Image (cartoon, rainbow, N blue to C red):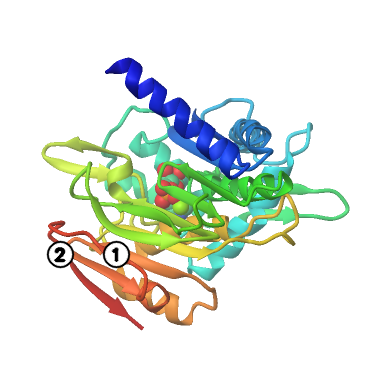
Amino acid sequence: MKRFSILIAALCLCLTGCGKQTTEATAQIFAMDTVMEVAAYGPKAEKAVQETEGQIKALENQLSRTKADSDVSRVNHNGTTPTTGLTYGTRALLPAALEYRDATNGAFDITIAPVMDAWGFTGDQFRVPEQSELNELLKHVNSDEIQVQEEPSYSVTLGEGQAIDLGGIAKGYTSDLVEQTFRANGIESGKISLGGNVFVLGGKPDGSDWRVGIKDPRNESGLAAILPLRDAYAITSGGYERYFEENGKTYHHIIDPTTGYPADSGLLSVTVVADANGPDQEWDQPGNGTMCDAFSTALFVMGEKQALDFWRNGGYDFDLVLVTEDGRVVITAGLADRFEEVKDSGYTYETVS
Ligand code: AMP
Ligand code: MG
C-alpha cells in the first residue's frame, strides 16, 4: 500500500510537471512565532520560495521584539535610531504604523508595547496586571509622541517611557514583500499563509480560485466561512490566536489602548480582505497586506458597529468578515456574492452594505 501511494505521488508530479510545464515548490517555515506555509508554481518556483524564506528571516531579524539585536529592540533600548541606522523594513513600516494609528483613531497603536510586556505577552510569563499599573503604562501609549524624520537622514525618536511593538503589522508587511518576490520571479500562481495572514497570487494552478478558509474561533479544527479569492490579501485577527487563562478567565493578546485590557468588543475574529498590490508597487513599500494587518487588529478592538462604520466611511478600500460572539458571520458587500457558508458550523450568515 505504501509503495502504491509513493508511485501515485510521483505520477502526479510528472503529470503536472510535463503536462503544464509548471513546477511546484512548497515550504513550511517557522518564524515570527508562527508556522508559515508557502507554495509557488512556475519555472522559477523554487527560487521564489527560497527568496521568500530569506525575506521572512530578514524581516524577523529587523522587526522582532524578542531578538535583542533587531531594529525594534534597539530603538526601544535607545529611545531613538541606533547608530547603526535602521534597515528598510523598519524604515518603511514606521510611517505606515503612524498613518494607521491616525486612521483608526488610536485603536491601532504600536506604542502599546509596555502594556504587552505587563501582560507577559512579549515573553511567556503571563500575568494579570493591576489596573493602576496599566493606567501608569497607558500614559505612554500615544504614537503622536513618536517623531519620524525621513530627510536628510532617517531618524526616529520615541517619547519618554515609550516602546514600540510592530507585531500587529509585521506579518502583513511580510506578505507585501512576498508578493514582490513572487512577481519578480514570474510566479503567476502562489499562496502564502503566515499564521492567519494569507496572500494569494493569481488563481490555483488549475485556473480555479484559491479557497481561503476563515478559522472558526470556537472550534480549533473547523472553519467559519470560505472565501474563493485570487490576487488578494485576507488577514485575520482573533483573540484565539494567543491567550492565557487565569482563574477561569481568558486573556488574549489584542489590547484595547483605552483600557489596557484585552479588547472585549463582542468580536471573535476580524478578517480584512483587499486586492493584491500589483506589479507597480515599490519593492520595500508597505501595501495592502500591511493595511489589512493594521485594520484587522484595530477593527477587532473597535467592535462590530465601529468596524462597519470604518468600512463604510474610513476612506480605505477593503472588505470584512466579522465573526461575532453571539454566533453570526457578518460579510461586507464586496464579498457577498462569493463567500461560502460552512454547513453545521452553527453560525448564521448576514451580508451588509
Ligand atoms: P494581530 O494578530 O495582527 O492582530 O496582532 C496582534 C499583535 O499586535 C499583538 O501580539 C501585539 O504585538 C500587537 N498589538 C496588540 N494590541 C495592539 C493594538 N491595539 N495596536 C497595535 N498593535 C497591537
Ligand atoms: Mg494585525
Q: Check disc 2 and report its element: helix, strand or loop.
A: loop
- Please, what is the three-letter code of the amino acid marked with disc 1? Glu
Q: Which residue is mark 2?
A: 326
Whole-percent x, y for residue 306 in the image:
36, 74
When asked about the image quadrant of residue 70, the answer is: top right
Residue at the limit of the structure toward the top, as seen here: 3
| Residue 162 seen from this side | no
How crowded pointer 1 is (Cα within 10 Å; few <14, some 14-19, many 20+) is rated as some
Whole-percent x, y for residue 260 in the image:
35, 51
Q: Quadrant of the C terminus?
A: bottom left
Q: Is residue 52 left or right of residue 184?
A: left
Whole-percent x, y for residue 89 in the image:
68, 44
Whole-percent x, y for residue 251 in the image:
25, 44
Q: Relative to 332, does residue 176 appear above or below in the rendering?
A: above
Label 1 lies in ligand 1 vicinity (Cβ under 8 Å): no
Depth check, mark 2 against mark 1: the one in front is 1
Q: Which residue is mark 1?
A: 340
Q: As rendered, which of 266 and 5 lies closer to the eye? A: 5
Q: Check disc 1 and report its element: helix, strand or loop.
A: strand
Q: Is residue 78 left or right of residue 137?
A: right
Residue at the limit of the structure toward the right, as seen here: 152
Q: Quadrant of the N terminus?
A: top left
Q: Relative to 243, does residue 27 appear above or below in the rendering?
A: above
Give the mark nearer the N terminus: 2 vs 1: 2
Image point (68%, 44%), residue name: 181
Q: Relative to 239, does residue 351 appear above or below in the rendering?
A: below
How crowded pointer 2 is (Cα within 10 Å; few <14, some 14-19, many 20+) is rated as few
Q: Is residue 336 left or right of residue 32?
A: left
Find residue 274 and name its label: none
Q: As rendered, which of 96 and 186 lies closer to the eye? A: 186
